[in-house]
Image: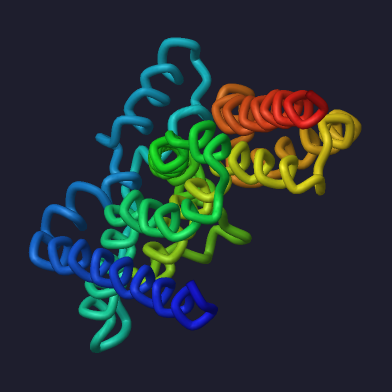
């Protein structure tokens, strides 16, 4: 294929991906009541799974600070078109999440012809693994990081005279950024795998900065979690395990390259 033929193929990959996102967004737009009531506003509710579990643990171990979001936030809208705009934004985010495996499949189909037989064979499950890591990250962000962040930021105040009344734009922006960012962060093992294959990262480099990575994860977790050990562990442990998995993958790829 010529350069322009490759370019045309890439254009159709992007077109099909955009169509998939729009299709998912239309579906989310139609069922907006379920999306908003059952998913978007759920993490701030006392009945949300994570909030309920942590409050039960707080009572069992007599650690009151562990109980989060015991009182739901007061969400307001201050713009005339604010709710409609958020309806569109949430629909697009939902469409992107739902269409993510298809987008990865389209990109993989575009890249696949350029790979050797051995490379295609060793990475035939790439789409599945990338999608699984992304959805695991989104779920982790939604069920763990989001409620902890909402509780911390929603109850934080600099004075008793200041009342937190949260704008819907701010709430949805924080929730979507946390969940999507978590989904992207969980792609770390895949990123490390490719960087190792390209020779830009080595296992020794990752091991050298293991302590620095752990400190960075601890700082991030300390910022978004309440001041208790259990919440800190809930965030730190999965992220650090991801980093260790990345080191193992890098070591495996490095050994194969030497062979």
Query: What quarter of the picture does the C terminus occupy?
Result: top right
Residue 76 seen anywhere in this rendered image of the structure? no
Task: Say left or right for 163 vs 208.
Answer: left
| Residue at (72, 42) in percent of width and height | 197
| Residue at (28, 81) in percent of width and height | 82
| Residue at (32, 82) in percent of width and height | 78
Task: Say left or right for 6 vs 213.
Answer: left
| Residue at (34, 44) in percent of width and height | 43
Given the current orientation, which residue lies at the most extreme bottom position?
A: 80
Residue 138 seen anywhere in this rendered image of the structure? yes
Nearest to the observer: residue 191 or residue 45:
191
The image shows residue 164 at horizontal and vertical percentages of 45, 63
Given the current orientation, which residue lies at the most extreme left position?
A: 30
Q: What coloring was used for the rendering?
A: rainbow
The image shows residue 71 at horizontal and vertical percentages of 34, 44
In which image quadrant can residue 103 be found? bottom left
Nearest to the observer: residue 108 or residue 63:
108
């Amino acid at each position: 294929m010529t350069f322009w033929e490759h370019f045309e193929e890439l254009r159709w990959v992007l077109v099909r991906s955009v169509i998939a996102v729009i299709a998912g967004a239309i579906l989310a737009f139609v069922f907006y009541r379920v999306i908003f009531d059952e998913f978007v506003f759920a993490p701030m509710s006392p009945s949300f799974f994570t909030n309920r579990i942590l409050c039960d643990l707080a009572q069992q171990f007599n650690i009151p600070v562990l109980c989060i979001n015991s009182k739901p936030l007061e969400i307001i809208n201050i713009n005339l078109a604010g709710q409609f705009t958020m309806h569109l934004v949430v629909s697009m985010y939902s469409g992107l999440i739902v269409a993510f495996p298809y987008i990865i499949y389209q990109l993989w189909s575009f890249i696949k012809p350029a790979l050797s037989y051995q490379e295609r064979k060793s990475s035939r499950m790439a789409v599945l693994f990338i999608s699984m890591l992304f959805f695991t990250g989104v779920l982790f962000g939604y069920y763990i990081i989001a409620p902890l962040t909402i509780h911390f930021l929603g109850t934080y105040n600099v004075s008793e005279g200041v009342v937190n009344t949260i704008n819907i734009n701010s709430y949805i922006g924080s929730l979507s950024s946390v969940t999507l960012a978590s989904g992207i962060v969980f792609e770390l093992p895949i990123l490390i795998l490719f960087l190792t294959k390209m020779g830009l990262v080595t296992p020794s480099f990752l091991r050298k900065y293991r302590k620095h990575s752990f400190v960075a994860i601890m700082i991030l977790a300390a910022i978004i979690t309440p001041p208790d050990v259990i919440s800190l562990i809930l965030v730190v442990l999965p992220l650090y395990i991801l980093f260790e998995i990345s080191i193992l993958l890098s070591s495996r790829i490095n050994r194969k390259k030497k062979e």
